[in-house]
Each structure stands twice: as structure tokens, then as C-alpha cells.
């Protein structure tokens, strides 16, 4: 099996006012924000361009369910299908089914504290 997690793909958290939060980070910390938040571009150890997403969500968002937490971390993975199969075999709770988009595949699991974790097999070149 390939590596499991290869990096952090995103930091997602709930906010009372996501628009104001994005503006605050833009003004005070220089984030280049858009409708989704802010995308940070970097190069992996092989020199390939990659990204990490920072996004505030509304307090009423159900995207983090079944977790009751105010945040969710997205981890970059190399082979989502294989990893989810392995995690199931290890007794990890898998939430929902894999979703695929032009920019990658997504799957979700719960950790031992009930935190929802998003796993992303990215296609970084599709984000440009």
C-alpha cells in the first residue's frame, strides 16, 4: 500500500459570519480570499504544485455531520479507494460514499473521538 496521508489538504471551521471572517483574514493577515476561503499554493517534495484550502463555513452547515465539532481537517492522500478499504478492515467508521470531481476524489471517516475527517486524493492541476 502507498503512503496513507501525504499532507493537509484543508482546514475547515464554522463561523458566525464567514464573509466577515474572510475579510478580517484578508485585511489583517493578507489572505487572498474568494468565495470558498483561501487557497495556499506550495510545492511537494517532488516539486509538483499542490494546494491547501482554508475555509470558514456557516454555523448552520451540516457538512461536518455526523460530527458535532466546529471544525474538520482535510488530509491529502495518494490512493483514496485503497485507503478507505484498508481503514474499513481496521474497524474505522467510513461516512458516506466516495465523491469525485475534476479536482479529485473525496471520502470521509470518523476518528476515535467522533471527529469527521475528510480524505482527498487531489488533482492539483485541475484547480488552476
Image (spheres, rainbow, N blue to C red):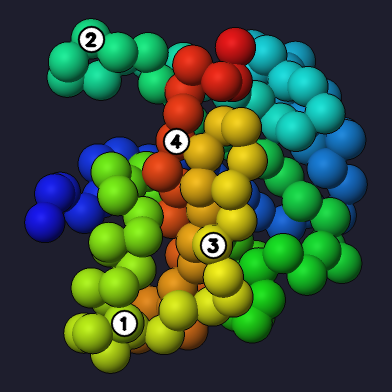
Q: What element carries label 4?
A: strand
Query: Distance from label 4 to label 3 (Cα)?
Result: 13 Å
Asked whether the residues under the numbered discs 1 and 2 touch, taking CB atoms below 8 Å apart as contact, a structural biologist would say no
- Residue at numbered disc 1: 88
Question: Within 10 Å of the Cα at label 4, are there few (<14), some (14-19), or many (20+) other Cα atoms?
Answer: many
Q: In which quadrant is the C terminus drawn?
A: top right
Depicted 10 relative to depicted 94: above or below:
above
Question: Within 10 Å of the Cα at label 3, are there few (<14), some (14-19), or many (20+) other Cα atoms?
Answer: some
**Which is nearer the N-term, disc 3 or disc 1?**
1
- Residue at numbered disc 2: 47
Query: Distance from label 4 to label 1 (Cα)?
Result: 21 Å
Between 47 and 11, the residue placed more toward the observer is: 47
Q: What element carries label 1?
A: helix
**Which is nearer the N-term, disc 4 or disc 2?**
2
- Residue at numbered disc 4: 122
Whether residue 128 is visible to the viewer of this picture, yes or no, is yes
Name the residue at the bottom extreme: 91
Whether residue 73 is visible to the viewer of this picture, yes or no, is no
Asked whether the residues under the numbered discs 4 and 2 touch, taking CB atoms below 8 Å apart as contact, a structural biologist would say no
Query: Distance from label 4 to label 2 (Cα)?
Result: 15 Å
**Residue 98's mark?**
3
**Which is nearer the N-term, disc 4 or disc 3?**
3
Question: Within 10 Å of the Cα at label 1, are there few (<14), some (14-19), or many (20+) other Cα atoms?
Answer: few
Query: Distance from label 3 to label 2 (Cα)?
Result: 28 Å
Query: Distance from label 1 to label 2 (Cα)?
Result: 32 Å
> In the image, what residue occupies the spot 84% across and 55% down?
58
Asked whether the residues under the numbered discs 4 and 3 touch, taking CB atoms below 8 Å apart as contact, a structural biologist would say no
Question: Mark 3 against mark 2, which lies toward the viewer?
Answer: 3
Query: Distance from label 3 to label 1 (Cα)?
Result: 13 Å
Amino acid at each position: 500500500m502507498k503512503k496513507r496521508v501525504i499532507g493537509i489538504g484543508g482546514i475547515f471551521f464554522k463561523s458566525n459570519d464567514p464573509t466577515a471572517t474572510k475579510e478580517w483574514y484578508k485585511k489583517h493577515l493578507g489572505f487572498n480570499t474568494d468565495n470558498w476561503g483561501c487557497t495556499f499554493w506550495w510545492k511537494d517534495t517532488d516539486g509538483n504544485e499542490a494546494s491547501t484550502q482554508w475555509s470558514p463555513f456557516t454555523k448552520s452547515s451540516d457538512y461536518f455531520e455526523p460530527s458535532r465539532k466546529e471544525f474538520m481537517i482535510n488530509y491529502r492522500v495518494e490512493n483514496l479507494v485503497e485507503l478507505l478499504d484498508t481503514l474499513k478492515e481496521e474497524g474505522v467508521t467510513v461516512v458516506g460514499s466516495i465523491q469525485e470531481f475534476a479536482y479529485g476524489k473525496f471520502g470521509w471517516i470518523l476518528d476515535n473521538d467522533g471527529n469527521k475527517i475528510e480524505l482527498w486524493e487531489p488533482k492539483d492541476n485541475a484547480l488552476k
